[in-house]
Every structure is written in C-alpha cells, then in structure tokens.
Amino acid sequence: MINPEVQQTSRVGVLAVVGVGLIGGSFAAALRKAGAVDRVLGVGRTPGPLAQARRLGLIDEVATLAQAAEQADLIFLATPVGTFPALLEGLLPSLKPATVITDGGSTKADVVQAAYGVLGSRAGQFIPGHPIAGAERTGPEAADATLYHGRNVVLTPLPENDPHQRQWLTRVWEQCGARVLTMAAQDHDTALASVSHVPHFLSSVFMAQVAASADADVRLRLAGTGFRDFTRIAAGSPEMWRDIFLANREAVLSELAQVRTVLAQAEQALEHNDGQQLFDLLERAALARRFWGSRSGLS
Amino acid sequence: MINPEVQQTSRVGVLAVVGVGLIGGSFAAALRKAGAVDRVLGVGRTPGPLAQARRLGLIDEVATLAQAAEQADLIFLATPVGTFPALLEGLLPSLKPATVITDGGSTKADVVQAAYGVLGSRAGQFIPGHPIAGAERTGPEAADATLYHGRNVVLTPLPENDPHQRQWLTRVWEQCGARVLTMAAQDHDTALASVSHVPHFLSSVFMAQVAASADADVRLRLAGTGFRDFTRIAAGSPEMWRDIFLANREAVLSELAQVRTVLAQAEQALEHNDGQQLFDLLERAALARRFWGSRSGLS
C-alpha cells in the first residue's frame, strides 16, 4: 500500500544538474531510473560533456544558469566547490522562491559560507550535502544509476532551511538508494579530512616520490596489487583535489600532523628493531581495518 | 610442434611446498593445472592447514622436512622469511644433491644470507625468488591456480647456482603463467621497499591513527571507496609484515625518509595556500599513476 502523498513528496518535477559528470550524471540517472523526476536540465561550462549527457539520456536539454533557476524544483551543484560562489551568483537573480539548491561537494564549511555570502537572506534555499561516493572515472560516460546504492549521503543543513524541504531532499536521496545522515558542517569536514582527504594527500605524495626516483622504471615494474590499491586515488583530478585541500586546509593539516606523530613512532620502532611495538601497531591497524571491512559493505 | 626435451625440462617430478597457504598452495595448484608436476608434498607447522590443503587437492601427502629433502626435486619455501634459517637447517642433512630449493619471500638480501649461512658449500642449490602476487586472503582455501597469471616473479640468483637449474626454475614459473625477471638481491629489496613495504607501512600507520581518534566511529561511517582502497593492505598479516619490515629495515627507513621530504613540501604548500605547487604535485602523481595503470595490466 503506497501512500500517494508520501510518494508524491519524494518526486522532483524539474531537476537541474550543474556539472553533468560522474556525480551529477549519476544523480540524474538514479532519479530517472526510480521514475522520480519529470525533466532534467543540464548546465555546464563546455558543450562537449553536455552533448554527451544528452546522447546518454542523462539530461533532457541543455540550459543556462538563469533558465535552471527559473524552471527547476531542485538544483544540484556537481562541480568543484571552488566554482560554487559564481554559480550561486548566476542562479540568484532568477531563483524561484520554492526551489531547493543542494550540492555534492566534498567539503561543507566553505560551501555554507558561500551560500550565506552569495544568497544572503535566501540562504535557506540551499541545503548543503555530500554523497560519499565516487570513482576514478569521470565525465558523463562514467555516470551510473546505481552509484549511490547503499552509500552514505551527509546533509549539513542550515538553521534557515525549511524542515519539509529537508525531509523532501532526504527522500529524494533515498530514491537513489542512499542512506542519509545529518551532521554539522564542521564535523563533516573534520571526519572527511581524516578518512578521505588525508588518504588522498598521502597517496599522491607517495606516488610523486616513487615517480621522481632515479630508478622509477624498475620500481614500477615490480609494483603489484598492494601498490595498485594504495595509489588508485592518486589518479584523481588534480584540480578537484587541490580545491578540496585548500577548502579544508586546517582540518587536513591538523590530521596530517596526527598521522606524522604515529609515523614517527612507527619509524622509531623500526629503527630500534622493536618487533613488538611494530607488531602491536600493525595488529591494531589490521583489526580495525578488518572490522571496518566487515561493517562497511564496501569491501 | 612441441620440443619434447624442452617440455620435459620444465617438468617437476616431486614438488615439496613448505607452507601451504596462498603463495605455496597457489604454486602447487598452478603446476598441477599445467600438468607440470607428478606429486606434491606439503610441509607445515600445524596439521589444520595441511589437512585442508590435502582435502582441496593442493598436495598429495603431508611430509616432514627430512622427507621433503629426501624426495623432492623442487622445494618451495612459502612461509615468513624469518622461518627460513630453521627450515634450511631441517632440510640440509637429507638434501639430495640435485634438488633445487627456492622461495616466495618478499625480501631477498636476508634470504641470500640465510642460504649461505645455513647451506654453506651447498648454497648453490638455493635459487632465491619472489613472486609479486598476493592478496589479503590467506590460507589454503585462498590458493588459486591463476594467482601468478601475468605476474612478475623476480629471481635473485647466486653466483653458485647452476645455470641449467636457473633456466629450469624460470620455465617452471612460466608454466604458472608468470613473467620471470632477474636482478641483484639488493636492487630487488630497494625497489620492493619503495613500491610494497612503504605503502604497507603508511597504510597501517594511517589506519592506526584513524582507529585511535576519539570520534573514530563517525569517521569510519563516512569512509568511502578511496579509504577502502588506500587501507586494504593494512588488513594484512601483522606477523608477516613485521618480519618484512625488520628484514628490509634500512631500505624501508631510507624510502620513508624520502617520502617524508615530499610530504613536508606538500604540507608547506598547503599551509601557504600555494595552489599552484599543490596542483603540480597532484598532477605529477596523477599522470604517473594513470601511466602505470595503463601499462601494468593490474588496473
């Protein structure tokens, strides 16, 4: 028995996706697949990806920011967070009062700041979000209607947000198969600095160090599956990750300092041939990782 | 047209596998599948895995070190490298003069030292090797006849090795689907410190740091696929990896120092909001990783 009112309230009439790559394209694809959206507008800087998104059926038509602001019930910003202030400025003049704007940005405190800074008294129309999903692949051809299945989406609502709109957005994400969590923007950023930004930072630093070594060729010939997994994230977009690090600079630096402390302890144990201390650290890490693996649904 | 002489010279009559886990069990399984072995003996410390290996058809019978030394044409040591001196001592008294011993250890300089130290004038019967393959899974049930398909196996031969036996061992590995490379033990250890041991060290340090944080639960709930890949190796055996780090201590410490230098530069760039320097590092890493991915056959 379906409650038609509830069903209706998780529908999106017109969706506008700004940035039709993996994150935006997958959101559109998931809502289309769920039959939860009537029409999808695609907004972007360059015609190539937009044309491709249309060929792939991710969007119905290409629109400008002003057209999206006039027509859309939900606007999803799925471009690097550094672009948000300019996007919001482009949306504001034509923005319908009932339209909800949300985003897929990996940092939230800076996005909240951009929302207040640009939207001012209409900041309540912006509900910041972050779907914890992604892949090395990018562009419309990487879009996947199942990308958000079983994944967490964090909302970091503003006090000005309408509670009904917040609930509606939660149900929209749930239609994509996601689990929705709510937390403060700063808590999100601290947690993400730890489990997403720092791993990327370390993986990239490591990869750059190996590539710069005199015998990089020999090394890389001997690299196996452990290397493959550890460095996979280092292949990600330099532009996007530079923006993420700068946007979440303090939390990332603070976590890196913590990691360096543990690293120094471990190096000292190795330097002193302290097998027991090394074993204890490796065992703590292995148990924590295995426990996480058994719980996360990702391993 | 198959040359019967060549075909015959890549056959193993009796194979003894010491340690019937992933590495040893997969070697036996691969040679069985290739029809390249007549009989497989399994040697181990504990009866459980041996019984399982027999049930799985990886080995024909359980044997002692002395029995293996008396009967085997090829003895494959597939236990942690720290156990090799004791194993070689157990093998030496009964070792047939024509028997070849090889191993699957992740470090080679210490294994070479153990071979000379224990086998003395018969060290030439030991051809050190390292198949660059593995997985988080362990034990006989993880054994897989295709584990070595397309993977590199490094041999670090001793001057005392018989060239024909070296060629024979090369062909035996090729029957497992592997590519065989030859290099000096020290060069192997330096390269592996860089592309295998240091990633494991960093992954474990990072995982231990996250697990020790006050809000570990929240962090780990928000961990996604990047975290999963970056920390996968941290789930590996603490015992085995402690031994590897201790065995290759100097090379690992030297590489870690190099990584710390690049890390300090990257942190400084972030601290100074130097987007260009950050971008340059991220781009170098991304290009190197993508190039490796396209070449390695592992991505």
Image (cartoon, coloured by chain):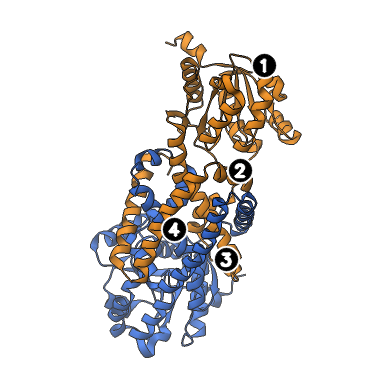
Chain colours: A orange, B blue
* Nearest to viewer (mark 4 / mark 3): 4
Mark pair 4, 2: CA separation: 24 Å
B123 over B32 or under it: above or below: below
Give me the C-alpha separation between circle 3 and circle 1: 54 Å
In the rendered image, which quarter contains the C terminus of chain A? top left
What residue did someone put label 1 on? A71
Residue A30: quarter of image: top right
- The spot of residue B280 in percent (x, y) is 64, 54
Decide if residue B23 is on the left or right side of residue B92: right
Residue at which label 4 appears: B202
Q: Which mark is residue A240?
A: 2
Chain letter of the residue beneath label 1 in the structure image: A
The subunit carrying tag 2 is A
Q: Nearer the viewer, mark 2 or mark 3?
A: 2
Looking at the rendered structure, the kind of residue marked 3 is Arg
Q: Is residue A67 above or below residue A8?
A: below
Foreground residue among B272 and A297 = B272
Of the numbered discs 1 and 2, the one sitting upstream in the chain is: 1
- Read off the chain for label 3: A
- Give the position of the N terminus of chain A as an image quadrant: top left
Q: Which mark is drawn over residue A221? A: 3
Taking the spot 42% from the left edge, 30% from the top edge, the residue there is A183
- Say if labels 4 and 3 share a chain: no
Residue drawn at 65 percent across, 51 percent down:
B276
State the residue in front, B202 or A183: A183
